[in-house]
Image (cartoon, coloured by chain):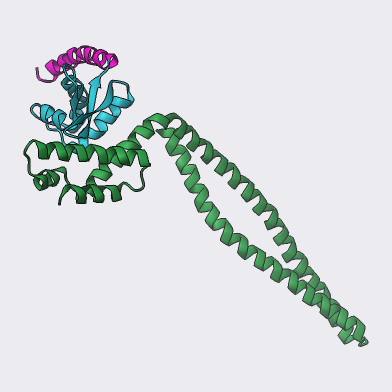
Amino acid sequence: MDAQLKKGLLDLVVLAVLKDDDSYGYKIIQDVSKLIELSESTLYPILKRLDEQGLVTTYSTEYQSRLRKYYRITPQGHTKLRESETDFQEIKRIYDFILR
Amino acid sequence: MDKYEFLYKLGKQLDTQPHQDKKEVLGYYEELIQDAIDSGESESAFIDRLGSVEKIARTLKKDQAFVENVKTKQNYQLQNVFSATVKIIGYGLFFFAMFVLGSIVFSLFSSGLSLMFFAALRLVTILTGGFELNNVLMFAGLILLGLGLILLGWWLARWMLKEAKGKLEKLLEAVQSLFKKEGN
């Protein structure tokens, strides 16, 4: 997929992965990878950005006597996902035009 | 490469980063590797897949620079235009000072020359007329004084040319950067 297009989508895909359940780095990559290619080094800046924008929060929980960092979607994150639907409708119209 | 070697090398690459950022990144990768091992992946194969530590650090720094840029873009551009303007005003003053110095150099040359010419003329009339040591010494001294003035002017002019050349190049750069920034 075109790199620019992908960059814009990845943030949303990561948010969508967190929609139903909190998750952690390794699992997020596995879930996203089923849909779209995502490397470990790409995920880190995405999570950081989502955190800074207040779309996710983080907390650490003990797992097998070590700490694991979990990411949870915030209400703003949910709003962002809903808003993306409007964007998507628009993109769809544009693509209908491109591919007509 | 095992986990510890990888984290050590990555840490080295991130030494220039703020401590908190470095800790976070290392924590992220340590957790990833541990989770991969726990789900039955091969440690070395997973680490190979992560790519070189140099590349990871590069990607990270690029992304950070990007975030910083977006945050401070407005200020950044203003600052640039401002500093370029100050530079140009500074160079304006510099060239004005050069102009003043240039006039001084010119007057040094011309007064030196006329002094020499005048003294030489007088010297000739004295030497052809009655020989008077006092006068000869005085006018010979005046010739030397004129020569000194010319040399001083010459030295100043050379220094000015050298300075002005360097400054002129920098001025052109400043003007160019000003227009580039405004063009953006």
Identify the image quadrant of residue B31: top left
Asked whether the viewer can see residue B8, the reply is: yes
**As rendered, which of A82 and A17 lies closer to the eye?**
A17
Q: Is residue B104 magenta?
A: no
How many marks do you count on the picture? Answer: 0
Rendered image quadrant of residue B50:
top left
Q: Is residue B125 visible?
A: no
The dominant secondary structure in magenta is helix
On screen, residue B20 versus residue B85, left or right, reads left
Q: Residue furthest front?
A: A65
- Colour for chain A in the figure: cyan
State the image coordinates of residue A63 (x, y, percent, origin top left): 18, 31
Lateral position of residue B170 relative to residue A65, left or right = right
Depth check: give the residue in front, B109 or A99: A99
Q: Residue at x 74, y 72 (%)?
A: B148
Nearer to us in this view, B77 or B136? B77
For the record, the magenta segment spans: A75-100
For the point 28% across and 20% down, the residue is: A55
For the N terminus of chain A, the image quarter is top left
Percent position of residue B13, x then y:
29, 49
Percent x, y of residue A48: 29, 30
Query: Can you say which quadrant of the picture contains the C terminus of chain A?
Result: top left
Residue located 18% across and 15% down the image:
A88
Q: Chain B is shown in which shade?
A: green
